[in-house]
Image (cartoon, coloured by chain):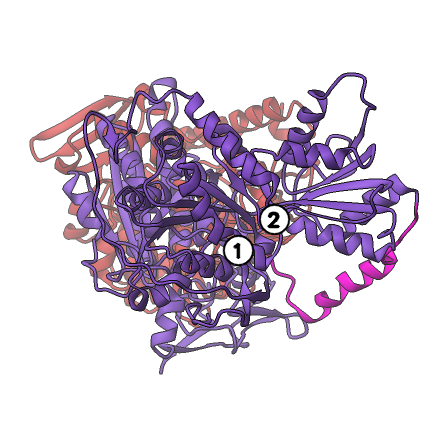
Chain colours: A purple, B red
């Protein structure tokens, strides 16, 4: 990651969208940034943390997003510009606070950065957080490229102070995670003196703040924001004065629209209005452009947010004005969900403008898709070789099968979400949000009175435990719910990139922190707690069976083993692992490829020609655990 | 009647999940997919093979009775009540110590110990009653081990799984004590020798027990736990008729439970069994009605005859004649089991020509289904 605090106004730097957002915050003189890791937003905080100390900034990994925004708000109230970046799910976690915050106003500028994941490449769901702005009555901006990611973030702090409200900046994966040229602005130094100027009942800084604020105060603030939006440089029009078709777009889809129009050669016939100030809608500006053409195509991700707002606006116009034809998600010209690409815009243009542009022969596409299969193993989603979760899920699968009462695991968010897949032996049968596994388990655990007999194992990770599981665990204990919480403690927030959490002993800024032990918390709650090494199959499976057999109240098993990626960076492999072809039965009766068909560690691969399993010397991390699953003892490990 | 060999999935659908499984263990112990656990056969994962040894050796998938009879006895399967045999008599161990620990006459223990001592077998697979009174298959290596396995358990124990688990490369000689269904499974294994496993040629001696039914371990054990103070029980016994009890012996005396209460824990598959006297063993051994402390012994094969001869020679057992009324009664009881079993099978399949797993010749079938 480049150091984003170089003091070189006017220089162009190649920056990832998230880095540009971080730079924008630096240029605005941000003093306090708190976040929780969530793809695609995770890089923002570390970019700031890298330079935080020398710039006198405080950067924090909080346990979850609502605590993060709460912490940032304290800074804002005390006069320090603050920011909290998160992914769409994080915004959902923070909503109760945000809803109140929207009414309260701010001290110094406060910016919420929410990064959505169209197509949910890296999420358990797909959600368009722009609706939050409309719902909460707060101003929202959407950058259309890397430069705007920086410039808008910088401006958002000013806007927040001028309007006296939290400002939301909404990006998507393709802005946050791709790199482009960004011209740097100046880097002012701010001297902060934090103090919280409370006075009177619910009053701060001489104004009524904490209660008794009528809702229309927010509406008036939005009107001020709207006025500023009407002349904002973040809204741009490119195209003929009277285009045959007007595209209204925002965010990453602006880039796709530009590319599409250029590819099919319609620059002289199609105009593009790109909005950057999305909510409240700059109505005068939009009306002006609606007058340019009666045919309008909306291109945006994910929901028809601008489409809906503009159609609302058009419906409220003077009756008797000519009627527009609106194309977009409602009409089916643009996908109603998922991530878009220039091809999607071209498809819409084909239909609307009656042209027939075909980018590529579909037969060619099929040929291209077939090529990787000749060179790559045809594999589904897999846990890393050596991953302790594979061993944990193996223990869970064995225990559930032997127990025989139709038990199952509930799932949560992390690498171990793969417990849903064959790579995790499909032991996980439900998946919702952070903390969801324990929450839903406490419900299942009370169904005994309705005849429910299936044992429930709630699976969660260590970071998830601190983030959201604790209240659900306590709920289970308090309400005497019958389930076993299985914490997969690999001492890492692995899926998002090994960010520190309360169990890892280190903060975002590299300060040592007292590592909080999950088993200590659980023991203090007075319930049965066992700590196991998931690599020790026999003991761990027996412990699970024993816990399941208790069949009442809440119990906890902590499966403790370090993430293999962390261990592997620090130490050399413990074993050299080999498969003896003489002993390997392969797909014969007695084995039927247990290791490469069921166990599915990428370190093992099936040799079609020899009909035997073998170790992939590049992928195998030498953890040696597969030795214990081979029914013929054909896998051998040698201490290195 | 379907005769082809199928795979683990079909075994689960046709046998394990339909109440037909006898828990003999023939399907388990040689692959990671089928394991026994607390009186249940568990399919751990899907095996994709369309044909598996698990299905092939199961005593509830198709058995060509003539074929296994020829394999073991060189004669086709007949409708004889007690199966094919050379001799029948009563016997007991000549050793007081063995008799003291035994269920009845201690003949099984005496013969297994002798076979080991004489080097006819190196190891024996027996059933031991563990501390919580559930049965456990053990590999006995010496007489001391054998003496741990003297009492009857009455709950099904998957001893063949133990056999299957023996290391492929080893060649020690094994003896095994079985129930009738296990004898059937082993005969199937002799007929179609298993591959990728411990060699069936190493199986040198099969002693079969008389059996009317076995109790389901997971259900009966829960019943016992509710009814008795398990740690105090030293021995169980189901005395021969006319008694109708299940007895538990503690140091303070005997607790009798009505057999009617216990019968409901019989494994459902026992209803479809035709074999009361372990017809597919080298020697079959059971109690003797009305003569306490002795065993009824049926010698069937040359191997069995040689062992008895050796036992007589070495004075390991005492022998007597089986009274004619006992023989008549035994034959009657055995025939009733055959007829009842066939009746239940036909009730289940609804078709006289579909005998589920039994591949009988038309002649034998006609004689038995009358």
Q: Quarter of the image holding residue B366?
A: top right
Indicate which disc, 2 or 1, sits on the residue closer to the N terminus. 1
Residue A101 position, x and y percent, is 36, 33
Label 2 element class: loop
Residue A403 visible to the viewer = yes
Position of residue A230 relative to residue A588, above or below, is above
Q: Is residue B292 above or below residue B349?
A: below
Q: Do the residues labelled 2 and 1 touch (CB within 8 Å)?
A: yes
Which sits in the foreground, A572 or A347?
A347
Q: Name the residue under label 1.
A: A151
Between residue A213 and residue A20, name the one nearer to us: A213
Q: Can residue B88 be seen in this view?
A: no
Q: Which circle marks residue A234 in the picture?
A: 2
**SS at mark 1 in the image:** helix
Residue B99: x %, y % from top left? 19, 47
Q: Position of residue A154 (x, y in %)?
A: 47, 53
Quadrant for the C terminus of chain A, please.
bottom left
Range shown magenta: A355-380
C-alpha span from label 2 to label 1: 9 Å
Q: In this view, does B36 lie above or below B249?
A: below
- Camera-side residue: A151 or A359? A151
Q: Mark 2 lies on which chain?
A: A
Q: Mark 1 lies on which chain?
A: A
Q: Residue B42 carries which label?
A: none
């Amino acid at each position: 990651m480049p150091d984003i605090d170089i003091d070189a106004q006017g220089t162009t730097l190649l920056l990832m969208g998230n880095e540009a957002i971080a730079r924008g915050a630096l240029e605005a003189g941000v003093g306090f940034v708190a976040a929780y890791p969530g793809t695609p937003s995770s890089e923002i905080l570390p970019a700031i943390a890298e330079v935080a100390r020398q710039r006198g900034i405080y950067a924090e990994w909080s346990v979850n997003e609502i605590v993060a925004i709460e912490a940032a708000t304290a800074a804002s109230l005390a006069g320090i510009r603050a920011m909290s970046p998160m992914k769409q799910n994080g915004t959902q976690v923070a909503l109760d606070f945000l809803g109140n915050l929207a009414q309260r106003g701010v001290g110094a500028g406060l910016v919420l950065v929410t990064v959505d994941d169209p197509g949910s490449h890296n999420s358990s769901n797909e959600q368009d957080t722009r609706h939050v702005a409309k719902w909460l009555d707060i101003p929202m901006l959407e950058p259309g490229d890397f430069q705007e990611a920086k410039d808008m973030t910088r401006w958002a702090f000013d806007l927040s102070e001028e309007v006296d409200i939290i400002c939301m900046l909404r990006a998507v994966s393709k802005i946050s995670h791709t790199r482009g040229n960004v011209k740097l602005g100046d880097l002012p130094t701010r001297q902060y003196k934090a103090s919280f100027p409370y006075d009177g009942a619910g009053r701060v800084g001489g104004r009524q703040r904490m209660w008794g604020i009528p809702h229309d105060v927010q509406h008036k603030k939005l009107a001020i924001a709207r006025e500023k939006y009407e002349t904002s440089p973040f809204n741009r029009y490119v195209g003929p004065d009277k285009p045959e078709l007007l595209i209204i777009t925002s965010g990453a889809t602006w880039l796709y629209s530009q590319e599409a129009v250029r590819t099919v050669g319609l620059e002289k016939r199609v105009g593009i209005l790109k909005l950057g100030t999305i909510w409240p809608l700059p109505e005068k500006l939009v009306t002006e452009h609606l007058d340019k053409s009666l045919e309008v195509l909306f291109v945006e991700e994910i929901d028809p947010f601008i489409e809906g707002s503009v159609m609302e606006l058009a419906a409220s116009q003077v009756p008797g004005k000519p009627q527009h034809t609106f194309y977009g998600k409602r009409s089916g010209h643009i996908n109603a969900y998922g991530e878009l690409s220039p091809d999607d815009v071209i498809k819409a243009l084909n239909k609307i403008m009656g042209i027939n542009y075909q980018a590529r022969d579909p037969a060619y596409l099929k040929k291209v898709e077939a090529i990787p299969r000749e060179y790559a193993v045809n594999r589904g989603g897999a846990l890393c070789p050596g991953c302790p979760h594979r061993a944990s899920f193996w223990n869970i699968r064995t225990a559930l099968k032997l127990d025989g009462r139709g038990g199952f695991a509930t799932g949560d968010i992390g690498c171990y979400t793969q417990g849903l897949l064959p790579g995790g032996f499909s032991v996980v049968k439900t998946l919702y949000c952070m903390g969801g596994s324990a929450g839903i388990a406490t419900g299942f655990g009370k169904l005994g009175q309705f005849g429910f007999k299936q044992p429930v194992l709630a699976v969660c990770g260590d970071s998830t435990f601190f983030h959201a599981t604790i209240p659900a665990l306590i709920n289970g204990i308090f309400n005497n719910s019958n389930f076993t919480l299985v914490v997969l403690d690999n001492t890492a927030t692995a899926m998002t990139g090994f960010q520190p959490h309360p169990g890892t002993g280190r903060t975002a800024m590299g300060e040592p922190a007292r590592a909080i032990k999950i088993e200590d918390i659980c023991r203090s709650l007075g319930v049965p707690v066992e700590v196991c090494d998931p690599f020790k199959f026999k003991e761990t499976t027996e412990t699970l069976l024993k816990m399941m057999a208790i069949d009442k109240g809440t119990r906890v098993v902590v499966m403790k083993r370090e993430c293999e990626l962390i261990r592997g960076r620090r130490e050399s492999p413990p074993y050299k692992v080999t498969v003896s072809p003489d002993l390997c039965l392969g797909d014969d009766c007695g084995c039927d490829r247990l290791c490469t068909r069921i166990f599915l560690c990428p370190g093992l691969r099936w040799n079609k020609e020899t009909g035997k399993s073998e170790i992939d010397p590049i992928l195998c991390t030498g953890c040696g655990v597969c030795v214990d699953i081979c029914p013929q003892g054909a896998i051998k490990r040698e201490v290195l | 009647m379907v005769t082809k060999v199928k795979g683990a999935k079909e075994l689960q659908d046709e046998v394990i999940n339909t109440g037909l499984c006898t828990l003999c263990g023939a399907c388990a112990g040689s692959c990671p997919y089928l394991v026994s656990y607390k009186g249940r056969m568990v399919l751990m994962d899907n095996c994709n093979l369309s044909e598996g040894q698990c299905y092939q050796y199961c005593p509830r998938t198709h058995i060509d009775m003539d074929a296994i009879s020829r394999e073991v006895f060189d004669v086709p399967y007949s409708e004889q009540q007690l199966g094919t045999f050379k001799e029948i008599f009563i016997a007991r161990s000549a050793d007081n110590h063995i008799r003291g620990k035994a269920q009845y006459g201690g003949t099984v223990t005496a013969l297994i110990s002798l076979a080991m001592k004489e080097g006819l077998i190196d190891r024996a697979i027996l059933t031991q009653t563990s501390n919580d009174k559930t049965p456990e298959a053990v590999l006995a290596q010496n007489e001391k081990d054998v003496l741990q396995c003297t009492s009857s358990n009455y709950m099904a124990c998957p001893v063949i799984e133990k056999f299957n688990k023996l290391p492929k490369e080893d060649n020690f000689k094994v003896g095994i004590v079985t129930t009738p269904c296990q004898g059937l499974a082993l005969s199937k294994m002799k007929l179609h020798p298993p591959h990728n496993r411990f060699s069936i040629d190493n199986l040198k001696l099969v002693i079969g027990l008389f059996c009317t039914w076995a109790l389901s371990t997971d259900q009966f054990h829960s019943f016992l736990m509710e009814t008795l103070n398990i740690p105090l029980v030293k021995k169980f016994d189901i005395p021969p008729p006319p008694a109708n009890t299940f007895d538990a012996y503690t140091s303070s005396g005997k607790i009798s439970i009505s057999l009617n209460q216990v019968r409901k824990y019989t494994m459902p598959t026992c209803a479809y069994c035709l074999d009361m006297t372990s017809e597919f063993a080298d020697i079959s051994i059971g109690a003797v009605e009305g003569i306490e402390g002795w065993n009824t012994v049926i010698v069937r094969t040359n191997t069995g005859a040689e062992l008895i001869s050796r036992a007589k020679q070495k004075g390991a057992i005492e022998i007597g004649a089986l009274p004619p009324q006992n023989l008549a009664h035994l034959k009657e009881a055995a025939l009733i089991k055959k007829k009842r079993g066939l009746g239940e099978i036909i009730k289940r399949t609804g078709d006289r020509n579909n005998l589920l797993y039994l591949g009988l010749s038309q002649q034998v079938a006609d004689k038995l289904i009358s």
